[in-house]
Image: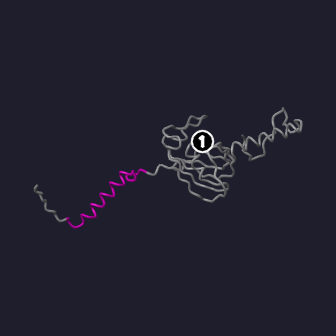
Amino acid sequence: MSEITRVPLQPIAKGSIGKIWLGVIVAVLIGSGVAYGTRYKGVVVETVKAGAGASPTKSDVALINYVGRLANGKEFDRGERAVLPLETVIPGFTEGLAKMQKGGKYVLEIPAEKAYGAEEKRNPQTGEVVIPANSDLVFEIELIDFKSAAELEQQRMMLEQMQKMQGGAGAAPGGAPMPMPQGAPQP
């Protein structure tokens, strides 16, 4: 029969239980990346005014008003009735718009990893850095409308058919096609 060595338990000093739990909590926070200023790395969409209906997908083209700012509040871009094919924009923008609805106004926060990452963006005319590397971005967005690429192609084809039926009477001077109505997304 083997002998068990017994170690007498020492009483825990008053207030030590709280310190033990605090240590456990800090260890869990550090392990999950919450402590020491690390923040959640996902796209955040805050609804300012709710929209209605479906949300755009990556294959859609959106018509929006927007203001783009750095996390410190400095504006770097602005657009009125901007036409954006969602498959051509930064991943965080596409992900954010997929959570929005037509007619709504939103604030979209995009972490650097889902924006331009370590790449800086410069003004092509001045060479000035507009978006520094590793910048989180914040956009105020009004989603006016969106259409699928297939809907836009169908509208373009219908417009061409109407122009042909009119014998070219709908063409602008110089034979250029008639412009789409203002605010309509261009294909």
> Residue at coordinates 28% horizontally, 64% vertically from top-left?
18
Residue 176, position in %: x, y?
Answer: 81, 34
Image quarter where the C terminus lies is: top right
Q: Main secondary structure of the magenta part?
A: helix
Q: Residue furthest top?
A: 174
- Where residue 29 sits, quadrant-wise, is bottom left
- Where residue 90 sits, quadrant-wise, is top right
> Residue at coordinates 78% horizontally, 45% vertically from top-left?
181
For disc 1, the neighbor class at 10 Å (few under 14, some 14 to 19, many from 20) is few
Label 1 belongs to which residue? 89
The reply to whether the magenta stretch includes residue 71 is: no
Total number of numbered discs in the rendering: 1
Image quarter where the N terminus lies is: bottom left
Residue 133, position in %: x, y?
Answer: 49, 40
Please report the bounds of the magenta region as a residue range. Answer: 12-38
The reply to whether the magenta stretch includes residue 25 is: yes
Q: Is residue 152 above or below residue 14?
A: above
> Residue at coordinates 69% horizontally, 51% vertically from top-left?
145
The residue nearer to you, when weighing 5 against 170, is 5
Residue 166, position in %: x, y?
Answer: 89, 39
Q: Residue furthest bottom?
A: 14
Indicate left or right for 46 with 147 as reference: left
Residue 140, position in %: x, y?
Answer: 60, 52
Q: Secondary structure at mark 1?
A: loop
Give the residue type that dot 1 points to: Val
Indicate left or right for 106 with 25 as reference: right
Color encoding of the figure: one colour
Indicate left or right for 118 with 3 as reference: right
The residue nearer to you, when weighing 145 against 106, is 145
